[in-house]
Amino acid sequence: MNEKPEKLIDKKGLRLDGRKFDELRPLKLEVGVIGNADGSAYIEHGKNKILAAVYGPREAHPKHLALQDRTIMKCRYHMAPFSVQERKSPAPSRREVELSKVIRECLEPAVFVEYYPRTMIDVFIEVLQADGGTRCASITAASLALADAGIPMRDLVVACAAGKADDTIVLDLDDTEDKLGVADVPVALMPNLNAVTLLQMDGKLSHDEFESAVNLALEGCKRIYAMQREVLKSKYANVKEVEE
Amino acid sequence: MPTFFEDKQIVIPGDLLAEGEYVAGENTYLENNKIFAQRTGLVTYDNKRVNVVALKSFYVPRAGDIVIGTVVEVGFTGWTVDINAPYPALLRASEVLNRPFKPQKDDLPQVLDAGDLIVAKIDSYDRTHDPQLKVGEPGLGKITRGQIMKVTPTKIPRIIGRKGSMISMIKEETGCHIILGLNGIVLITGKTLEDERLAMMAIRRIEEESHTSGLTDRITQMLKTEKGKQEEKKE
């Protein structure tokens, strides 16, 4: 595990875990997994295991944060101490605080925040196991949890990363590729409105490489969105059956 | 002017429902002449109007609604009531006492204390103010006995049924008095615990099978067989 591989991509063009350059890791989604929450979702994205829970809209606490014209959204991204090889301190790190903000700002455009003024929507994201690309998986799960809570939304949000490993543009980087690779470009998309709500880049890419990375990530988003749809609908599959 | 789904198909937030000269109804929104869904639910095309019947939602107060709530706080001049909505509801002391409130004389916790359940009507509510409750009408006020159950607020119309057919049938079959709070809380008071349990069972079943047709008949059947079983036990 700790040995550094010489090459991230072999002669056949396959990656360390045997994927092709444009292949996603295996994905598993579930909604309504936490009974206490108003809405919840669970995602397994490769080795990532993440829970998302949504509460609200509810009375804003502390009260002075409440806004007169809209809901405030609060987001907490947290990694469990056992989520990585070396124990992570449970206190929120600089990175987690930043990711909380990034995820919140990426979900906010999808929610009709102006509908319920003076309230608050809480989004909790708990990373149980991390293996690169947790922010994207978290966004995908959190938007499902929001929809599951019955909160009015413009669209679902779906996220996926692309990047550069060795000298190939690849989709959906895992932890090794992220750490040893050249660049990482996470993208979040509202697929029906065709609007990007998150675009970051870590590393160095040329203009052309950047463009192909973004396009590849968008392609990945659309593939994940298809699964997101299915899982949200499948919760009510029995309703549909009876209907017919 | 195309539509993109069939009537009563399941849609999820962001689904494009119709394009062109349609009117955005419940749980939908209009953007660039296109109508999208806001919630997971069943889409209905009603002439030019596109609606989504939400499968899961939360209660949003509306003036005139009957709700059932729990007193959570006794204040100086009234109570704060949890009505299962994003906003806490306020109940003024003078409203309950039916006369001006005198702080020296009246002891609020003696009238209503934290934890008490009340049936109330929403007097007023808008975006800028928390809902105000009133209890000065027959049938409203403190709840002293019965069973409380929670259902999804969107299912309340189904429990009422067309022109109240479903709820009046349950009332008749079980002999219970039932108050449906529009906030998704139901109060059932019957002569015996068995009657109340029976009514609760029926309501649970409606909640689970709310989108099936011929439900009233099936519930009637269920209540009759259950009653038969109970009588057998007694003998």
Image (spheres, rainbow, N blue to C red):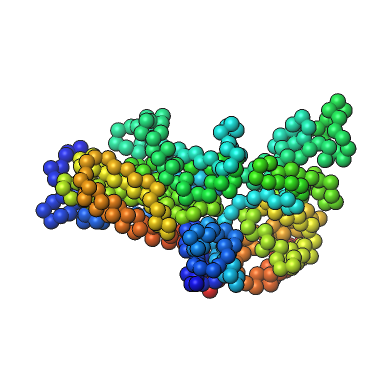
The residue at the point 46 percent across, 55 percent down is A155
> Residue A78's quadrant in the figure?
top left
Q: Quadrant of the C terminus of chain B?
A: bottom right
Tell me the residue at 37%/30% (across/down).
A94
Q: Can residue A137 be seen in this snapshot?
A: no
In this image, A156 relative to A26: left or right?
A: right
At x 71%, y 63%, the residue is B160
Identify the residue at the far left of this view. Answer: A11
Examine the rendered structure and indicate whether residue B231 appears above or below residue A28: below
Pinpoint residue B128: horizontal percent, then vertical percent.
66, 42
Report the number of numbered marks.
0
Percent x, y of residue A109: 46, 48
Q: Quadrant of residue B208?
A: bottom right
Q: Nearer the viewer, residue A27 or A189?
A: A189
Q: Say which residue appears at 13% left-offset and 51% top-offset.
A: A10
Rendered image quadrant of residue B165: bottom right
Residue A46 left/right relative to B137: left
Describe residue B187's horizontal placement relative to residue B36 as left or right: right
The location of residue A27, given as percent across then percent down, is: 34, 54
Coordinates of residue A83 in the picture (x, y in percent): 35, 38
Query: In the rendered image, is residue B30 in sight?
Result: yes
Residue closest to the eye, A206 or B229: A206
> Does A154 sit above or below residue A100?
below
